[in-house]
Amino acid sequence: MAELELRRFTAIGATALHGPATMLPGLPQRPGWVAVAGATAIWTAPGTWLCLHAPGTALPVPDPHRTAMDGSRAVFGLAGRLAGEALATILALDLHPRSFPHGAAAATLAAHIPLLIWRDGEAFRLACARSYGESLRAALLAAGRGRGLVEHDAVPYPG
């Protein structure tokens, strides 16, 4: 693995969930994320989650509690030993594993772009509104300068 790797994810379905956490067992009830029902469920506010999944996937949640948002997000993965250091240049969030461990998630700004960030093992995932995707990519490339950043081809979101 390179010191720093950037990958854009494609083929992303998105569903906003709103209601009681019991509508889908396993949903996080505080800031964080979990893999549930074939999706990445990210807590965004009390009683609200963003779920990223394969396009066309129907989450087992009653219709009144879900809103389809397919195509609404650009999602990137940043991995490698220098990922936290690179991200520190564009966002004001302590990403040390003691403060932001696996399973942590936050809504924040990076390079003036509103986004969700979550830690998946040693890697970070970042999701922003699709219209900000190229701006976030440019900010991540700039953050990786001098850190051996390797940009990989886009791949389908792993779920």
Image (tube, rainbow, N blue to C red):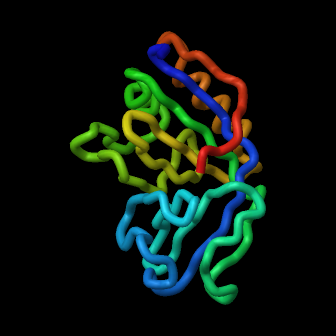
Answer above or below: position of 54 versus 5. below
Q: Quadrant of residue 93?
A: top left
Answer above or below: position of 55 versus 150. below
Residue placed most toward the observer, 1 or 71? 1
Q: Residue sitting at 43 percent across and 43 percent down?
A: 120
Counting labels gives 0
Residue 153 on image: x %, y %: 71, 25
Residue 119 on image: x %, y %: 41, 44
Q: Residue sitting at 69 percent across and 55 percent down?
A: 54
In the rendered image, the residue lying farthest to the left is 98
Residue 63 on image: x %, y %: 69, 86
Q: Residue sitting at 71 percent across and 32 percent down?
A: 154
Residue placed most toward the observer, 91 or 59? 59
Answer above or below: position of 33 versus 65. above
Residue 13 on image: x %, y %: 71, 58
Q: Residue sitting at 48 percent across and 48 percent down?
A: 117
Residue placed most toward the observer, 88 or 4? 4
